[in-house]
Image (cartoon, grey):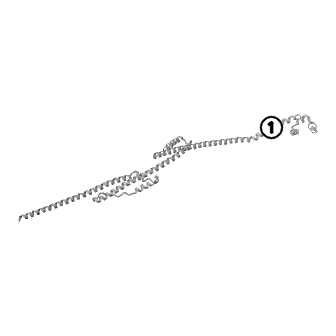
Amino acid sequence: MEQPTKTKNAMSKRVIAIIITAIAVIAIAAGVALAVHRHHATSQLTEAKTACAQAADRLRVAQNTYNALINGDEYKSAVKITAKQVEDSKVVTALAKDSEDEAPKMVACNVDDKTALERNTGLIDKNTTWYETHTKTIDTDVKNVVKARDTKTLKDTQAALAKKITDAKKLYDASKDKVKDNKTRDTLKKQLDAAGKLKDGKDVKKLKDAQTALDKAMKTVNDSVKAKQDADKKAAEEQARKEAEAAQAAAQAQANAQAQAQQSYTAPQQSYTPTYTAPATPQYTAPAAPQYTAPQQTAPVQPAAPSKPSTGGNSGGGPVSGGHGCGSLCTSTTDTYDR
């Protein structure tokens, strides 16, 4: 009877050993599975963090490119350009509108949850796209504005130079024989020829330099014209002064001559009466005396002569014949003598 009992106990021990072994195997398997699960979860988290970090790096590059653009000189210059400075004001409006868009908010990767990391990674990628898109858009806007400004500047500069050439030609023609130094007109002509060759050029700087050179040459000509006008005016004033002095001297000389003539004319007038009266008596009485006295010497020889004229018949005799032609003068003299 002892044999079966031993066999039964042995079987019981084997079953217990098998159960223990199975439990151990299950425990090991569970541990392994748990370890595998944990490893997989850790790996996925690591991968999510890596992906988020890579997205953040791409975002950082896009941000730097965008910031370099809007902080650059070209953009700063473009945003100052007004609608009046360009041919088409729409480009200025577009740049202003695109520049007003707000940049997205920052998203971080400093989380330990795989799902949160994946969500943030998606937001970061979206922000990167915004920066890249706006960089291209604003860069295009800036180029359009600058191009529109340069186009209008070129046309305006060409028009200004053309007008300056026209004005310079007018000045060149009008200043002929009116400048003090004709070299100034020669210089203006040279600048006119040079500007004429450049007027349709595309180099704004050269066009402006040509206009500046014309301005300088025109100023020189105008200064020379004024210098000649001043010199002519001074010469005319000097000539007028000399003529006035000569006229004044002539007038003074004439006045002096008139004064001297007046003095020499008045002096004879004071002596005219004695000069005229003194010779009048001798010129009148001197001939009468000889005519009167010559016949009076024979009067005593013929005392009867006075009675003969009353008869009217005696035409002879010296005294009577000598008296012809005397008239009343002889009679008057005879009467005086008889008395």
Q: In this view, which residue lies farthest toward the bottom? A: 1
The image position of residue 119, as x and y in percent, is: 31, 59
Quadrant in which the N terminus appears:
bottom left
Question: With 25 as the anchor, is 302 left or right in this view?
Answer: right
Residue drawn at x 22%, y 58% is: 36
Give the percent coordinates (x, y) of residue 325.
87, 37
Residue 126: give x, y in percent of width and height.
34, 57
Does the rendering let one see residue 230?
no
Q: Mark 1 points at which residue?
A: 283
Q: In which quarter of the image is residue 44?
A: bottom left
Q: Is residue 130 left or right of residue 317?
A: left
Front residue of 153/38: it is 38
Please state which of residues 47 and 110 is positioned toward the viewer in this rendering: 47
Q: What element carries label 1?
A: helix
Residue type marked 1:
Gln
Residue 291 shows in this picture: yes
Q: Name the residue: 24% across, 57% down.
A: 40
What residue sits 77% from the left and 40% below the top?
276
What is the total number of numbered labels drawn onto the structure image?
1
Which quadrant: the C terminus? top right
Going 33% across and 53% down the picture, which residue do you hit?
A: 58
The answer to whether residue 285 is left or right of residue 183 is right
- Decide which of 308, 161 is in the foreground and name it: 161
